[in-house]
Image: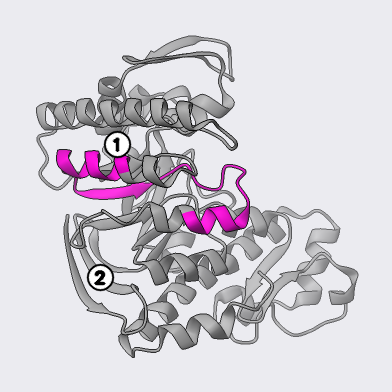
């Protein structure tokens, strides 16, 4: 993928960019919903397209376990399998291996684990993870990495980061060996926990290897808010200006504003659909918990400043009623609105950068309750 920076904000490190991807042009900063198992929960691929979503994040580890790679290959790849025409990034599933698997054993050559689904035992090497993602026909591939939780000792953070760097080097070699499609991209993942020097070391070593883009992982794993923003800053210092900067797993609107101000380009998070399934809507006036009884007689839309099909057609009272009777449509409608809101929120961020008003935009929304 080709990436161009077209404008930089005058007050912050925020920047406007354009990605010329195999699935179309994508303007940055942008947000990708999470479709872990090949579906953004409660939403169809057509729903995402109607929200003007340009890309999604899927998880290679989950898809490897079920429905299994050979099933997806039978359908001609993940795009055909799920009826999705936009960009697909696949995460290796390193985080899930370490957080969800039982009886796991980490070695320098890879990781062995027992499936949480049926107990079957597997071994994943960095090479195997690249092969899986190529078989899935992902557009952007992420290598196997070790994501540690919080808190963790500096000694172990450095040890795991060195392992992540080693795996990244092996992954690039495998990618160059196996990938015959020049439109596919390989990103790396920066780790290092809360330790600035470890994160900077990781960046320096990964930049030497050279990747198409640089993802930042290992954030929002239990650390307090002040450390999270410090990790944002520590993880971007040495990423080349002309490369895509992808902050993984970050999606609260206030976190997005902070990260954009530091120069990040791509974000993903489960928040829009997870909040939607629990009856929480994100609006231009902050968070609305539509399940609350106070909304039972309100005939106004979720968000009077939103023109999505949910806000054009349904009242707060009706949506609250759907949740009250445990109707699954309620989850879909609020999830749709939330994804649409995120798309429009990122559009507004881009427009503010274009007009050199990003700092004003950030200050306008940073005190809202999201």
Depth check: give the residue in front, 118 or 107.
107
The tag on residue 17 is 2
Percent across and percent down for residue 53 are 40, 63
Label 1 environment density (alpha carbons within 10 Å; few <14, some 14–19, many ≥20):
some
Q: In what element is the residue under mark 2?
A: strand
Task: Identify which residue is drawn at 44% across, 64% down.
Answer: 259
Q: Secondary structure at mark 1?
A: loop
From where the camera sits, is residue 79 visible? no
Name the residue located 74 percent from the left edge and 85 percent from the top edge. 300
Bounds of the magenta span? 201-230
Residue 304 at x, y = what percent? 65, 86
* Residue 44 placement, left or right of 151: left
Residue 212: give its label. none
> Label 1, on which residue?
77
Q: Is residue 138 above or below residue 162?
A: below
366 is higher (above) or lower (below) than 272: below
Corner quadrant of residue 247: bottom left
Work out whether residue 38 can be spotted.
yes
Within 10 Å of the Cα at label 2, are there few (<14), some (14-19), or many (20+) other Cα atoms? many
Counting residues from the start of the chain, the first of labels 2 and 1 encountered is 2
């Amino acid at each position: 993928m080709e990436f161009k920076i077209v404008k930089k904000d005058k007050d912050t490190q925020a920047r406007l960019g354009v990605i010329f991807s195999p699935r179309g042009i994508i303007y940055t900063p942008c947000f990708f919903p999470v479709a872990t198992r090949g579906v953004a929960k409660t939403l169809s691929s057509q729903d995402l397209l109607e929200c003007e979503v340009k890309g999604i994040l899927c998880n290679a580890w989950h898809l490897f376990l079920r429905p299994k790679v050979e099933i997806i290959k039978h359908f001609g790849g993940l795009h055909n399998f799920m009826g999705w025409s936009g960009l697909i990034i696949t995460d290796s599933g390193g985080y899930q291996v370490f957080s969800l698997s039982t009886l796991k054993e980490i070695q320098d050559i890879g990781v062995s684990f027992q499936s949480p689904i049926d107990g079957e035992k597997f071994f994943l090497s960095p090479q195997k993870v690249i092969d899986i993602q190529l078989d899935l026909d992902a557009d952007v591939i992420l290598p196997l990495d070790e994501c540690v939780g919080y808190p963790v000792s500096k000694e172990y953070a450095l040890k795991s980061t060195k392992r992540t760097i080693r795996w990244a080097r092996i992954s690039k070699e495998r990618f160059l060996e196996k990938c015959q499609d020049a439109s596919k991209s390989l990103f790396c993942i920066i780790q290092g926990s809360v330790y600035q020097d470890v994160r900077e070391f990781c960046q320096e070593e990964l930049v030497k290897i050279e990747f198409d883009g640089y993802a930042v992982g290992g954030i929002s794993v239990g650390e307090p808010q002040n450390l999270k923003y410090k990790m944002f800053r520590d993880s971007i210092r040495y990423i080349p200006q002309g490369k895509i900067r992808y902050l993984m797993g970050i999606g609260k609107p206030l976190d997005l504003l902070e990260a954009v101000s530091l120069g990040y380009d791509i974000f993903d998070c489960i928040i829009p659909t997870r909040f939607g399934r629990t009856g929480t809507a994100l609006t231009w006036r902050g968070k609305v918990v539509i399940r609350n009884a106070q909304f039972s007689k309100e005939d106004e839309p979720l968000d009077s400043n939103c023109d999505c099909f949910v806000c054009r057609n349904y009242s707060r009272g009706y949506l609250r009623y759907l949740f009250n009777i445990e109707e699954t449509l309620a989850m879909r409608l609020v999830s749709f609105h939330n994804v649409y809101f995120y798309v429009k929120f990122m559009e507004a961020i881009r427009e503010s950068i274009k007009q050199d008003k990003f700092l004003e935009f950030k200050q306008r929304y940073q005190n809202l309750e999201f």
